[in-house]
Amino acid sequence: MNAAVVRSPATDWTFVVPVIALVALVLTWGRDLPGWAVALVALCLAGAVLAAVHHAEVVAHRVGEPFGSLVLAVAVTVIEVALIVTLMADGGDKTATLARDTVFAAVMITCNGIVGLSLLLGALRNRVAVFNAEGSGAALATVATLATLSLVLPTFTTSKPGPEFSGAQLTFAAVASICLYGLFIAVQTVRHRDYFLPVPTTRSAESDEEHAEPPTARATLISLGLLVVALVAVVGDAKSVSPTIESVVADAGLPQAVVGVIIALLVLLPETLAAVRAARRDRVQTSLNLGLGSAIASIGLTIPAIALASIWLSGPLVLGLGATHMVLLTLTVVVGGLTIVPGRATLLQGGVHLVILAAYLFLAVSP
C-alpha cells in the first residue's frame, strides 16, 4: 500500500470526511431538506464513499485476502439490511416490495456491474483476465441457489396468495440462507482459502503498494472504526436524500422501483470502487470476491433479518420476482457460469455482463 494508507488516518482527509458525513447525517435525519442541503449531503455521501474504500484497503492490506474483501462486503450489507428494516418499519404497505427490489438490485449490480467492470479492466490490462474458477464458481452457485430459494420460489408457492411466502416457508428460506452463507464463509476463509486468492499472471508487475509494510494493529483498528463510520454515513445520507430522489422520480413519471435501484447504486459504490481499483492492479480475483461475495451477503443476511423483523412489521412481504426479472436472473446465472468455468475472460465476457446490467436498468425505467 502507499504511504497514505499506512500513516495515521488523523493526518489526512480520510479521517475528517467520515466524521463530517456522520454529523451531516445526524443533523438531517428525518427532516425535509431544501435543495442546498440535499446538495451538501450528496457531497458528504460522495466523500464518505471514497473514505470507505480507502479504509477498506487499509484493513485488507493488514488481514490479507480473502478476509479483506469479506470485511467490506459484510460491513456494507449489515448496514444495508438495517436500512431496509428501518424503511419497512416506517413505510407500511407501500414498502411491501422494498426488500425484494433492494436485494435483486444488489444481485444485478454486483453479479453484472462489478463482475463485468472488473473483467473488462482486467482484460484491458492483460488481454485476458485470469481468476480462480473453483472459488468464483462456488460463489456463483451460492448466489444462484440463494436467489432462487428467496426470490423465485415465492412466485410459485401456493400456501399463500400472491408472490409471498407463508410463515413456515419464510422461516425455511431464512434458515437455509443463513446456513448457506455460513458455509460459504467457512469455505472461503478456512477450508479452501486458496481458491479465493488472486492468480499471478506473467504480465503482473507487483506495485509498491503490494510490497509496503502492512499497517500497524492500531492503524488497522482506527481504519476499521472509520470504515464503519463511513458506511453508516453512506447508507444514512442515502436515506436522507431518498425523499428528494423519490420526488424527482415521481415528477419524471418513472416507476417507484427506480428509487430502490438508485439507492442500491449509492450504497454499493464503495464496493464498486474497491473492485475497480483491485482490477486495475491486476487482482481480478479480489474484484470477483467483492462482487459475488456482496451478492451472497445481500441475500444471506437480508432474508433472515427480514424474516425476524416480520414478527413485528405490519403489512405484506412480497419477495417473488416478476417474469421479466426472473428472465434477467436466469440470464445472469447462465452467462456467469459460462464466464467463470474457464477461469479466463476477455473483453467480450465483461461487455456481456455490462449489457445485462444495462438491460436491467433500462427495464427498471421502462418496464
Image: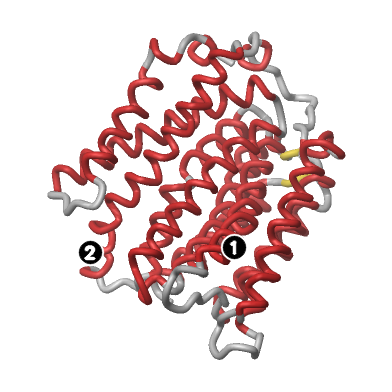
Mark 1 closeness class: few <14, some 14–19, many ≥20 residues within 10 Å: many
Distance, label 2 to label 1, CA atoms, is 28 Å
| Disc on res. 247 | 2
Q: Is residue 241 above or below residue 1?
A: below
Q: Quadrant of residue 19?
A: top left
Mark 1: amino acid: Ile
Q: Is residue 35 above or below residue 177?
A: above
| Disc on res. 303 | 1
Mark 2 closeness class: few <14, some 14–19, many ≥20 residues within 10 Å: few
Mark 2: amino acid: Ser
Q: Quadrant of residue 199?
A: top right
Q: Which x, y percent locates residue 175?
A: 70, 63
Q: Are marks 2 and 1 in contact (CB under 8 Å)?
A: no
Q: Which x, y percent locates residue 118?
A: 61, 42
145 to the left or right of 75: right
Q: Nearer the viewer, mark 2 or mark 1?
A: 1
Q: Is residue 162 above or below residue 61?
A: below
79 to the left or right of 298: left
Q: Is residue 148 above or below residue 296?
A: below
| Disc on res. 171 | none
Q: Residue at x 22, y 40 (%)?
A: 27
